[in-house]
Image (tube, rainbow, N blue to C red):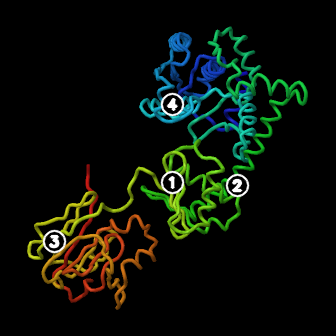
Amino acid sequence: MDRKVLSYIRDNKLLKSKDKILVALSGGPDSLCLLNILLELRQELDIEIAAAHLNHLLRGADAIGDEEYVIDICNTMGIKCFVRRLDINIYAKEHRLSSEMAGRKARYDFFEEISEKEGFNKIATAHNANDQAETILFRLMRGTGLDGLGGIKASRDGKIIRPILCLSRSEVEGYIELKKLNPRIDKTNFERIYNRNKIRLDILPYMKENFNEDIIDALNRMALLLQKDNEFIENLALSLYNKYCIEDSAYFIIKKEIFIEEEPIATRVLRNALIKYSKSNYDFEMKHIYEIFHLAKKNSGKLIHLPNGIYAENIYGDIYIKSKVEKYHIDNKIEDIILEKNNINTNEIILDNFIVKFEVITDYEMSQIISNQNKFTKYFDFDKIKNNISMRNRRNGDKIIPLGMTGNKKVKDIFIDMKIPKDERDSIPILCFDNKIAWIIGIKISEEYKITDKSGNILKVVVERKEY
């Protein structure tokens, strides 16, 4: 059995020399089989092994017994064991998840935490070929796509590995008997109140008896074929994701051009954007993807709410993925702040989120001035300012002569042209010199106060995010 697993590990490049493996150990037959096989292969693979167990506190004394058993097994085998207790019912309510989803999230969060703290680079779970078949049927009945029908992959994100996915449950049980191991048995696995148990106890045995006695192998072969097809399509989707999606710490932008691409590719691009932004693989269904398709056909300003605390908004045809709890404007609404020109070197303007700093420069090189400018660092001709410098939000009728132009343009039209969301426009600070707009912060500067070869004194203005 260990030779079969070794071949599977090598064929799928699951492990390499010096890897540190954290085994998810429940104490049941599958995880005990996985741990023992890895221990038998430890020297040959040149790996380090430890185990982790999360007690969900769902089964009273049985759960405590599982925990104690795992600790004893690890002590006997001479490996480290990390254990944590967590009331999964309370956790599920706090995170508004089903018990099953809460258990999965809590387990993987625990495994990730231990891995980061202790330096493990791989997390091994004990999914087997029967689990694969059950997962495929479970997803099929929920209405999954190609990715879902591909089932469980041998590895995920280069860190989660399933070394015994090649073994059937009967092979696992045979190994347990051969090695005279004594695993813990979770009685809830035989209760038909759970849909997955019904698949395991009723549907698969019925299919095996009446349609195909090798149904487990058949479903696993199908999964491998579909995984290869899906990988090809995903690579196409990745190239379009890089082309049409813009990642920002505050929001993601999905350009409207994606919606003219072939639907199987476009849906994957949208799903990848949702997953990357929300950092969750399990909250989004195809209905959410198609809601975004419909949103793209609506007027600018329309939005839809999505799972995991985010929403999508149509802004001039582009789709912005945002968080419901974050604010994306530069600052909150501010009152007029006025500074005297003569005292500008000793002043700064403090906003809710930003600090605006001023510096008058008398000795400079034009090349350095040009190279040092960026979105939040600008230089102005200080000598053109007569009396004061002020900061405010926009007002009705505001105009500016944009850099490089000769005539005025309404600030409102600039926001429209640059597709600034409506809910952000009133909160973008505006820097004024003598009541004339010099800089729409982060957006546009004025032609009137630009520096030239004839400029004498220069005003440097830097907008910095406040540290908390």
| Residue 368 percent across, percent down from the top left | 27, 75
Left or right relative to 459: residue 31: right
**Decide: marks 2, 3 in contact (CB < 8 A)?**
no
Q: Is residue 50 above or below residue 421?
A: above
User: Mark 3, residues whose alpha carbon is within 10 Å: few (<14), some, or many (≥20)?
Assistant: some
Q: Amino acid at mark 3?
A: Ile
Question: Residue drawn at (49%, 33%), measured in percent from left and top?
Answer: 109
In the displayed structure, 242 sits above or below 441; it is above
Q: Earlier in the sequence, mark 2 or mark 3?
A: 2
Q: Nearer the viewer, mark 2 or mark 3?
A: 3
Is disc 1 placed on a helix, strand or loop? strand
Residue 18 appearing in the image: no
| Residue behind mark 2 | 233
Residue with the mark numbered 3:
338
> Looking at the image, do the residues carrying marks 4 and 3 touch, with CB atoms under 8 Å apart?
no
Which residue is label 4 attached to? 92
Residue 311's label in the rendered image is 1
Which quarter shows the N terminus? top right
**Position of 152 compared to 225: left or right?**
left
Task: Say what amino acid the circle numbered 2 marks.
Answer: Ile
- Looking at this view, name the residue that lies furthest to the front: 396
Q: Which residue occupies the foreground of this view, 355 or 170?
A: 355
- The residue depicted at 51 percent of the width and 62 percent of the height is 253
Which secondary structure, mark 4? helix
Q: CA distance from mark 4 to mark 1?
A: 22 Å
Amino acid bearing label 4: Ala
Q: CA distance from mark 4 to mark 3?
A: 52 Å
Q: How far apart are the two marked residues, 2 and 4, measured between alpha carbons?
A: 35 Å
Q: Is there any visible trace of residue 305 in the rendered image?
A: yes
Residue 335 in picture, x, y percent from top left: 22, 66
Horizontal side of 54 relative to 295 (left or right) equals left
